[in-house]
Amino acid sequence: MDRENSIIIGSDHAAFELKEKIKDFLLSRGYVVEDAGADSEDSVSYVDYGKKVAGAVSQGRFARGILLCGTGLGMSMVANRFPKVRAALCSDIFSARMSRVHNDANILVMGGRIIGDILAYELVRTWLETEFEGGRHLDRIQCIDL
């Protein structure tokens, strides 16, 4: 598996529809996508899916992941509990870009009840295409990643 071209994605029921759209968007751009669930709009706990995605990124099985729930708040809280995970909750293009440039975010989190699909596609595209700047920012990240 090409880690740089592979993405793990997960959502709860509240963002299931948006996850499916983003998955198709990623596949159309040549990414290999592993879907960690949820598999429907039936009520589930966001915690379970946040752990699956964040665990896979934390263990190095995937370089990047995407998480979605109703607001994105719960997923970002779960994901950031894992070592070496830097999950960024983004709902605007500037934040998505800066999460990569300054923070080398490895999980993008979005709120399915907050943003629409067109904005989500642009957030994903920006986040995937933006490189980490390094330098002084690397020193700061190393302080986080104890």
Image: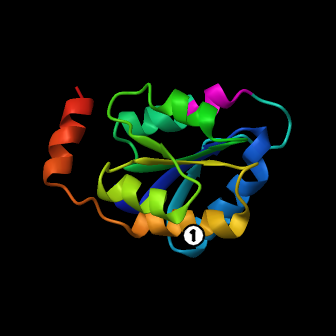
To which quarter of the image does residue 48 belong? top right
State how many labels appear: 1
Residue at coordinates 49% horizontally, 32% vertically from top-left? 79
Residue at coordinates 72% horizontally, 51% vertically from top-left? 114
> What colouring does the structure picture have?
rainbow
Q: Which residues are magenta?
A: 45-50
Q: Is residue 15 visible?
A: yes
Foreground residue among 39 and 79: 79
In the rendered structure, does residue 46 fall within the stretch colored magenta? yes
In the rendered structure, does residue 21 fall within the stretch colored magenta? no
The image shows residue 123, relative to residue 105, as above or below, that is: below
Per the image, the residue denoted by label 1 is 122
Q: What is the x, y in percent for residue 129?
A: 40, 69
Q: Residues within 10 Å of mark 1 (few under 14, many from 20)?
A: some
Q: Is residue 146 left or right of residue 106?
A: left
The image shows residue 65, relative to residue 38, as above or below, that is: below
Residue at far right of view: 42
Q: What is the x, y in percent for residue 45?
A: 72, 26
Q: Is residue 2 visible?
A: no
- Quadrant holding the N terminus: bottom left
- Quadrant holding the C terminus: top left
Residue at coordinates 31% horizontally, 59% vertically from top-left? 101
Q: Is residue 68 left or right of residue 130?
A: right
Type of amino acid under label 1: Glu
Q: Is residue 52 left or right of residue 72?
A: left
